[in-house]
Each structure stands twice: as C-alpha cells, then as structure tokens.
Amino acid sequence: MADYVLMAAESFEQHQDLEYTTIQLVQLGNEHPLRYIQKAIIIAEELGYSLEDIEKLALLAQVYQVPESTLEAP
Amino acid sequence: MNSRFQEERRQPPYYLLTGLMLGLVFGFVLTMVIFPVQYTNVPPETLNSTDKDRYRVMIALSFQANQDIGRAAARLGLLRDDDIAGQLIQQSRRSQSRSDAQVLLNMAQAIQNPFVQPVVNLEPTEEILTDIISITATPSPTLTETMEPTNTELDEQISVTPGPTRSASTAIIQSSPTPIITTGLPFQLTENKTICNPSYRESLIQVEVFNEVGEPIPNARITVSWSNGQNSFFTGFFPEISIGYADFSMTPPTIYNVQVGEIGKLVTNLTAPECKDNEENLYWGSLYLRFDAP
C-alpha cells in the first residue's frame, strides 16, 4: 500500500493533478485519500523508506490538507 | 404407567436443525453483505488481472516521473510476471487510453533496453497533464523526438505545437528506439485519399503501411513534421483497425509532411481537407495515406 501511494505521489509530482491522483488513491478503498497517505507515511517510516520518498508523500498529504476553498480559488 | 409413556412418539429435534439453518443464513448475510471481508496490504501478485493492469499503469506513470528504471523493475517484479516487457506491451495494446498505452510502451522499451537512457524529463505542465488525464488523444506515438532535444525547446514545442500535443504525454525522449526492422525500407505512397466522415472528432492523418506482399506491418516508424515541430510514432497500436495502422491528429490549416521509415519518400504539403456535411456545413476532414514497401 505504501509503495502504491508513493507511486501516486511520484506521478503527482510531475503532473500536479490532484483529481487524477485522487482517482488513483480511491482504488485503495473507501477512505479519504489523505488517510491512505498518512498510513503510507507511517509504513514508509517503519520500513525505512528514504527521506526523499517520505517527503514526496508528505508533500502530497499537504496538498490534501489545503482547505477546499483554497484549492478552488482561481 | 409404562404403557402410557410408550404410546407417546418421540419427536426428532427439528428445532436444532432450524437453529442451524438460521445461524448459517445469518452468518452468510453478515459476512457477505454487512461486514464483507476486505483484503488489505495483499501482495500485488495476488491482484486480479484488472487491478494488475492498474498497478502496471501506476508503475509506468511513476517511471515516467522519476525515470528510475531500477525501481520500476523492482515494482514490476512484485507482480511475478514471466515476461515483464511482454506483459507491458500486451497491456498497452489492449489499453483503452492511448496515453496509458504510451507510458506502458515507454517503460517496456526501457525494461528491454535499460542502457538507453531517457534524456529528458519534462517539467510538469498543464498540457502534459491534460493529455494524461483526458484520453481524447490520438494514437500513440511511442516515442517523441525533437530535432534538438533540449528542455527549453521541448517545452516550447509542447506549448506551441499545433496538433499533436498528445505526444507530450510521453515526456520521454529516447535516443535510440527499439530496433525496427522496417526502418531501412524505402516506403512509397501508393494511395492518398480524402476522408470526409463527420463522425470523426478530429482531423486525422491515417497511415497504413504494407510490406512488399501487401501485408500490413506493425512497428513501422512514421515521422510527421510541420513548420515548427516533428513527431514520430509507430504502427501497430490499433490492431482492431489494422496492425499496419497509425494516425495523427492534425490542426488545420497546418501543413504537414509524412515519412515512413528512415529512407521512405517524404510526402509533403498535407493539410486537413475541407468537407461538407448533409446540411452543407463545412468541417475539417481527414487524410488516408497508404504506404507500400517496394
């Protein structure tokens, strides 16, 4: 799961499309994508992922934590 | 007294059977409907074929972003496929999305030929994103080339390219593609006709390539160039049409040149034709070009 989320984070880093990344993450289940990213960060830390990878996950989590009103603003 | 008891017939314990049946039904409903089993953190090799396909696309998109072939190969290894590159190519052929097909092929080529380094990793742009997400694009150039592949020029090409912005979704420039056996054949244009079909959503250059005995050829490289850009792609990604077929989206009134293979005759001054529908409304048509090996 953590690697799947990392893949989503890696591709998000390139295309910057939150909607597309959300589509990828909801494949994991019914929870909010942010929840999966948070779980992935925990697992990644446990498994000793590189700092660079964890930062990618954290950056994606940050994007989901931005209030919707800010995201929708032009 | 004993005789009176003997007259009463003993009933079998049906209530136990009924209880068992009710328990089974209740358990079935509970586990299948109310609290179905949810598998999490299963290894990728246990996924069903649809999810494996999704997983491969994820790996390919990730590879497109980070160009880390070692990591991509390790991830693909988790699927325990016998022929990793073959699986990627097969999936690209059955992929409904051309952009997905393209990233899968790029990764397959990188797996097959790991010493060919993709040299350009584009900065993220909205054009790329649009191409990745909206799957309206046309087929599938497997490789994208520019004359001088510098980041700056490539970015410019993406933003000003008249037609094939979809090619940007590859975001990969390979210095030497997988060997194409048809490269050295001097293909010649044998048919050039205008297609007026209002059901086409785009103006296309439809190319079909045949060998010397008239059989369609896959993996034939087609190069389309125009005043400020160039794009290369290959036949074979639309087997439902023909394995020798490929197409390219034109942006009228841009003028295009088309060449098949490395030494095929260059067909010049191609542009989208004007067509009229039943109500005499003008629309842009398409071109069909047939190339044959001598």
Image (cartoon, rainbow, N blue to C red):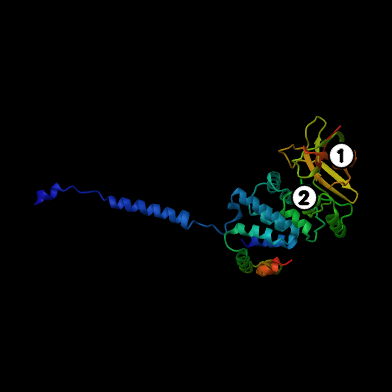
Residue furthest to the top in view is: B213
What is the crowding at mark 1: few (fewer than 14 residues within 10 Å), some, or many (at least 20)? few
Check disc 1 and report the residue beneath it: B184
Give neighbour class at mark 2: few <14, some 14-19, many 20+ (Cα, 10 Å): few
Task: Answer whether labels 1 and 2 touch (C-beta < 8 Å).
Answer: no
Q: Which image quarter holds the C terminus of chain B? A: top right
Number of the label disc, if any, that sits on residue B264: none
Give residue B272's position: percent from left, percent from top: 85, 42
Amino acid beneath label 2: Asn
> Which residue is found at the position 57% from the left and 60% from the top?
A30
In this image, B30 relative to B197: left or right? Answer: left
- Earlier-in-chain disc, 1 versus 2: 2
> Image quadrant of residue A74?
bottom right
Q: Are marks 1 and 2 on the same chain?
A: yes
Q: Quadrant for residue B292, please give it.
A: top right
Left or right of B178 on screen, residue A28: left
Image position, residue B224 (x, y; %): 86, 45
Chain letter of the residue carrying label 2: B
The structure residue drawn at horizontal position 47% and vertical position 54%, both measured from the top left corner, is B33
Q: Marks 1 and 2, how far apart in space?
A: 21 Å
Q: Looking at the picture, does residue B35 appear above or below residue B94?
A: below
Q: Quadrant of residue B190?
A: top right
Secondary element at image label 2: loop
Instruction: Specify the subunit that label 1 lies on.
Output: B
User: What residue does disc 2 label?
Assistant: B113
Q: Position of residue B94 (x, y in %)?
A: 68, 44
Q: Depth-wise, is mark 1 or mark 2 nearer the camera?
A: 1
